[in-house]
Amino acid sequence: MANKTEIIAEPGKQELFIKREFDAPRDLVFRAHVDPDIYVKWVGPRDLTMTIDKWEPRNGGSYKFTHERGGHKYGFLGVYHEIVEPERIIGTFEFDGLPERGHVILGTTKFEELPDGRTRLVHQSLFQSVQDRDGMIASGMERGVSEGYEKLDSLLADQAGTKSSAA
């Protein structure tokens, strides 16, 4: 596989970075992050199914979705603080299955246009504590992110093929 997901989490810091390149134009990669019909098909590990309960990809909008595996449900929610198409998305992310609420992550995703119709995605997650960040990593986040982006590669290839054959 040509494009590898890179997760950078320096010891003792409250942040992590996710870097990934895609063989697709920036507008398609960005749209995959805000269009619920696309988003539901790629986010998370392969063995989970997603249901979107609320989806308002706009400044001040919110979202809520559920992943399910074998009867177990995992809910996630957040607020979009800023969406600048097709450059960046800034918002919060929270897992609603923790014993206490308030472990909110502030995320910034930037979409950089590369030559030859390619895109570089750089995502920064800022956690409230090092323990929150390390707990997220220990939860299997890396597998979910990597498998999700592999699914997105396939979807983007299909969309780019459809788009170019329609032209």
Image: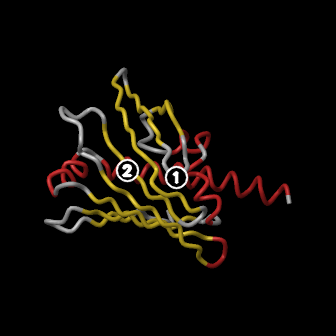
The image shows residue 83 at horizontal and vertical percentages of 53, 57
Separation of marks 1 and 2 at Cα, in angstroms: 12 Å
**Residue at image location 37% in from the left, 65% down from the top:** 6
The three-letter code of the residue at mark 1 reads: Asn
**Residue at image location 70% in from the left, 52% down from the top:** 159
Which quadrant holds residue 139?
top left
Contact? badges 1 and 2 (CB < 8 Å): no
Which residue is nearer to you in this view: 51 or 96? Answer: 96
Left/right placement of residue 23 relative to residue 48 reads right
**Residue at image location 26% in from the left, 63% down from the top:** 15
The three-letter code of the residue at mark 2 reads: Thr
Which residue is nearer to you in this view: 63 or 141? Answer: 63
Pointer 2 residue: 92
Left/right placement of residue 161 relative to residue 100 reads right
In the picture as drawn, the residue positioned furthest to the bottom comes out as: 115
The image shows residue 53 at horizontal and vertical percentages of 49, 30
In the picture as drawn, the residue positioned furthest to the top comes out as: 71
The image shows residue 58 at horizontal and vertical percentages of 55, 49
Residue 101, disc: none
Which residue is nearer to you in this view: 153 or 136? Answer: 136
Mark 2: give few (<14), some (14-19) or many (20+) Cα within 10 Å: some
Q: Quadrant of the C terminus?
A: bottom right
**Residue at image location 28% in from the left, 47% down from the top:** 104
In this view, 97 is above or below 107? above
Mark 1 residue element: loop
Q: Earlier in the sequence, mark 1 or mark 2?
A: 1
The image shows residue 38 at horizontal and vertical percentages of 60, 44
In the picture as drawn, the residue positioned furthest to the front comes out as: 60
Pointer 1 residue: 59
Mark 2 residue element: strand
In this view, 75 is above or below 134? above
